Image (cartoon, rainbow, N blue to C red):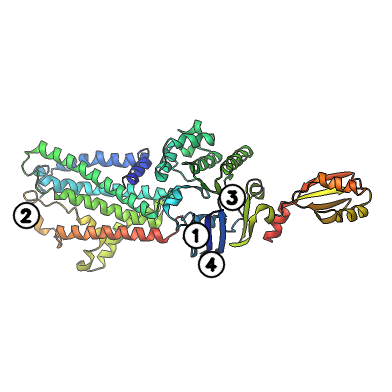
Amino acid sequence: MTAVLNINGISKSYGKVQALNNLVLQINQGEIFGILGPNGSGKTTTLGIILSVLNADSGSFSWNGKEPSKYDRKKIGALLETPNFYPYLTARQNLSIVCKIKEVNESEVDRVLSIVDLINRANSKFKTFSLGMKQRLAIASTLLGNPDILVLDEPTNGLDPQGIAEIRAIILDLASEGKTIIMASHILDEVEKVCTHVAVLKLGNLLTTGPIQSVLNNQEQIFVVSDNLDILKLTLSQIDGVSNITQLGEKVSVMLAEGKDSAYLNKSLFDKGIIASEIGIQKSDLEANFLEIIK
Amino acid sequence: MLDLLKIEYKKIIPYTTFWVIFGLFFVFTPIVFYGVGQFKIEGFPIDFSTMYNFPNVWNNITYIASWFNLLIGMLFVILTCNEFNFKTFRQHIIDGHSKTDFIIAKILLMTSFAIFSTLYLFIIGALFGFISGGSEGFASDNKYLFIYFIQSLGYMSVGLIIAILIRSSAMSIITFICSILAESIIRALIPDAIDQYFPMKIISNLTPFPTPDGMIAEQMKNSMIQETMSLNTTLIIAVVYIFIFWGISYFILTKKDAK
């Protein structure tokens, strides 16, 4: 795996407030990397620094192993905080300026406007757009030139449920093409649904980072019910690949090793003479895990 | 470089304020210039009858137009502040411009504004000159056009610094106008030997009150306060100031976060 972005010990403070404290991160090609954290945790500061709009107090970063330059940024599609366009220009005029800056062909404008479903409003002025349309135009702008790297700060901000689903579909689509996507969000659900990797920030400190499954402990839990819970627990402990056996009321919850599923568990119990009256799967409580991390 | 200028014009050609201000400049400069020439009072020591003749016309029209030069300066302040208000400055950095590109684009834009308004004055001046008299003296004294060009750059360079420092259009325009007033107040407290080098003084002195031979009675000419500095010296200092202003703008912009 090649590192697309390396962040080496970046710190940044605004006056007395330490916004980012010695952040170290590596983001590899093809990852959908979520930067997760509550408000004021340093997500936007991090993205601002790697996009060269904020100057870091110390530390460095590199795109594709090289010193950052404007030529790298031309090949990155990025949305930071709010959609920024000239209110008196139309969607098409605004995007054609971005095309000029990014040195991509202007035929790209219609392509990206179609993707975000704004092609019918291409000749409307930006100031006439609703918040959701502005956000979609900003997403369209990041797609100009079909960049291999996307940096998205709260991409579904201001969108209605349908819009959120559409944008997520677009992001997953891009990810399936092997693009690297760096996404900041305070919405856990969004990160969980979209990202492959995650870093959790709080008050400028990196709390944890890694593949999303391991960070958020997002393993499936299996619930088993049978007439005698004590015998059930004893039997479960003898089955290969079963761990974390805990009794929760009238149920026993277990975790299964990779490659084992509920059918395997059911068969193993049956082989040992236990008939489960109920077997169910439940995702572990992401939110509880997240709150545990940032506590 | 040319691409940077093309992008600037993509931004402003659909912008109404741009057309309104340049429209005012284009319409009012010849009207006011014509109007002043019709000014007749018994015993007034200025003879306006040769005002439009070559070569007097060059000094006269650049002096009249210099008041409208402030208008172009204000337009430039508004355009630069817009980049901060709309956060498009920040967005352009994200999209792949550098802060240096921003400054270069703005310098190219102000240069193109200065070229347009100077060319326009050349055309208007030439028309007035040819209509009112012969072509004699057409080629002399048209250094005033070049000086006007520098003055135009000077006002817009001051505007650039103010816009970059203050960033809000309303406050920047007020500061731009007040900087002229404030400087004259400060100048009143400082000996002439020093205050003649102040930037706004230098820039506004580029288009001196016209005193061509034969237009103003000798006794009035003698009673007027004569500038001690020659026009050439003023010009050189003005050019130095412009480069300093560009340098300061660049310095401020690169030190600050692109908010």
For the question of whether residue A124 can be seen, the reply is no
Per the image, the residue denoted by label 3 is: A31
- Amino acid found under the numbered disc labelled 3: Glu
Do labels 1 and 4 touch, CB within 8 Å?
A: no
Between tags 3 and 2, which lies in front?
A: 3
The chain letter under disc 1 is A
Viewer-proximal residue among A137 and B165: A137
- Amino acid found under the numbered disc labelled 4: Lys
In this view, B242 is above or below A117: below
In this view, B193 is above or below A6: below
Per the image, the residue denoted by label 2 is: B218
Per the image, the residue denoted by label 1 is: A61
What's the mark number on residue B233?
none
Q: Are the residues under marks 2 and 1 on the same chain?
A: no
Q: Earlier in the sequence, mark 1 or mark 4?
A: 4
Q: Residue at x 62, y 37 (%)?
A: A162
- Position of B103 with respect to A81 (left or right) is left
Between tags 2 and 1, which lies in front?
A: 1
Q: Are the residues under marks 3 and 2 on the same chain?
A: no
- Position of A43 with respect to B13 (left or right) is right
Per the image, the residue denoted by label 4 is: A16
Q: Earlier in the sequence, mark 4 or mark 3?
A: 4
Do labels 4 and 3 touch, CB within 8 Å?
A: no
Do labels 2 and 1 touch, CB within 8 Å?
A: no
Q: Specify few, some or many for label 4: CA neighbours under 10 Å numbering under 14, 14-19, or 20 or more.
A: few
The chain letter under disc 4 is A
